[in-house]
Structure formats: structure tokens, C-alpha cells
Amino acid sequence: MAHFPKPFFKKSRRVWYVEINRQQHNLGPDKDEAFRKYHQLMAQPGTRSVSSGTVPPLVDSFLDWVKRENAPDTFEWYRYRLERFCQRYPDLKLRDLKPYHVQQ
């Protein structure tokens, strides 16, 4: 059976959370406000999927997320390394991506 996200209260932090797509969202300490935020999150459309079967579009999506969610230095750290990776494997298919590609 599929999991349907529901708000839950973390006693240790005294805060409401909801987990959507394996990501926890802090809804705040007030129950009524938490459920209002929960309904807003659930009303948002789903995240876009990667349409291409190669690695570079996936890297672009990841870098968009890093830029939005992290510090500029963090973005630059990932951007530099991932650009070099994509230059080395420009036509690598997602289904062919192996751990050794990343480790090298």
C-alpha cells in the first residue's frame, strides 16, 4: 500500500513535521498553523521529472535544487565537480551510471 504523508509531532523538538517524497518539512510548533502549512504543501504540484535518459539533465536539476536550498559556496563546490563529470561522460545514460563513475 502506498504511503500517504500525514503530519506528525516530534516530542524531542516540539515541532510538527510532514514527510513528502522522503524529505521532512518543518511545519512549526502550533498544530493549527502546522496543518494549514501541510495543506499548502499538499496542494502544490509534484516536482518535475527528468525527461532525458542522460546524466547531464539530472545534474542540472540537482544543481537547481542546490542553488535554491544551500549556500553559494556549496553550490560552487558541486557545480565545479559535476561540470567536470559531465564533460568526462557527456553521453552517459542514467541506466548505465555505476558507482565507479562517481568514485573516479
Image: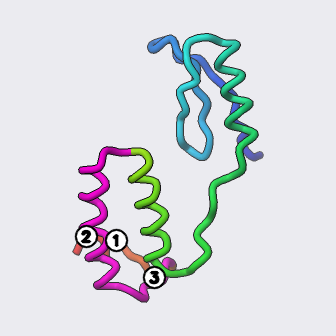
Residue 58 horizontal side relative to residue 100, left or right = right
Q: Which residue is mark 2?
A: 103
Residue 85 got which mark? none
Name which residue type carries label 3: Asp
Residue 68 on image: x %, y %:
44, 49
For residue 92, which quarter of the picture? bottom left
Of pointers 2 and 3, the one earlier in the residue sequence: 3
Residue 79 on image: x %, y %:
30, 64
Residue 96 got which mark? 3
User: Mark 2, residues whose alpha carbon is within 10 Å: few (<14), some, or many (≥20)?
Assistant: few
Q: Is residue 38 above or below residue 72?
A: above
Name which residue type carries label 2: Gln
Q: CA distance from mark 2 to mark 1?
A: 6 Å
Q: Residue at x 34, y 79 (%)?
A: 86
Q: Residue at x 60, y 36 (%)?
A: 19
Residue 93 horizontal side relative to residue 37, left or right = left
Which residues are drawn in magenta?
70-94
For residue 3, which quarter of the picture? top right
**Marks 2 & 1, CB-CB < 8 Å contact:** yes
Residue 33 horizontal side relative to residue 29, left or right = right
Q: Which residue is mark 1?
A: 99
User: Mark 1, residues whose alpha carbon is within 10 Å: few (<14), some, or many (≥20)?
Assistant: few
